[in-house]
Image (tube, grey):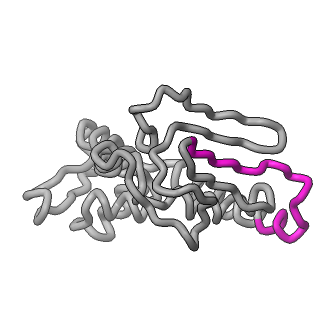
Amino acid sequence: MIHREYTSSYQAKFVIEKERMYVENANRASQNIVITPDNMEPIPKNPIIASFFRNIGYADQLGSGVRNLFKYSKFYSGNDPEFIEGDIFKIIVPLDEGNREEQTTQSVTQTTQSVTQTTQSKENDPEKNIMELIEQNPFLSQKQMAEKLNLNKNTLKYYIKKMKEKGVIERVGTNRKGKWIVKS
């Protein structure tokens, strides 16, 4: 929705093939180029929609998708993705695992194990992790807690709401100058 050019009737596509994944959608191109992190100039196609999704936590800052795809594509395929800007905007992400070098495989394995361990320890009991954070620093904001626990802000709000309903935690004072209390 954020990148779509709504004045065109071109059908957006998301296709997964054996060797690649690609996305195509209508675009209002400022230039016809292949985009890289070095020559990228983020221009919002639908700034109001983008702003809305950023504010509710479902989108990152402008241009982060290009940077993230270039960063993580090497881990999964050993190759860079292609961003082609024209009247039809195309993103092509290679999926050929046969091109990966042994070093990249080891790096992916180590990263995956690290992320899995961190995620498992934090996902095992998010409510317990929230209570521990509150006990350490009762003045943390929800945004700070979400960052420390590596949770989406909306996910954290869900757990806090559940915990308040159970009577496990309570907020005393205002959102800005208040503090959390663990009731156990």
Residue 60: x and y in percent read 42, 55
> Would you say 91 lies left or right of 166 here?
right
Q: Nearer the viewer, residue 86 or 97?
A: 86
Residue 56: x and y in percent read 31, 46
> Would you say 104 lies left or right of 2 here?
right
Q: Is residue 102 above or below residue 16?
A: below
Magenta stretch? 88-107
Q: Residue at x 34, y 51 (%)?
A: 54
Q: Residue at x 41, y 43 (%)?
A: 2
- Whether residue 172 is in magenta: the answer is no
Quadrant of the drawing holding the N terminus: top left
Residue 76: x and y in percent read 76, 56
Residue most extreme to the left: 173
Residue 90: x and y in percent read 62, 45
Q: Residue at x 83, y 38 (%)?
A: 18
- Whether residue 94 is in magenta: the answer is yes
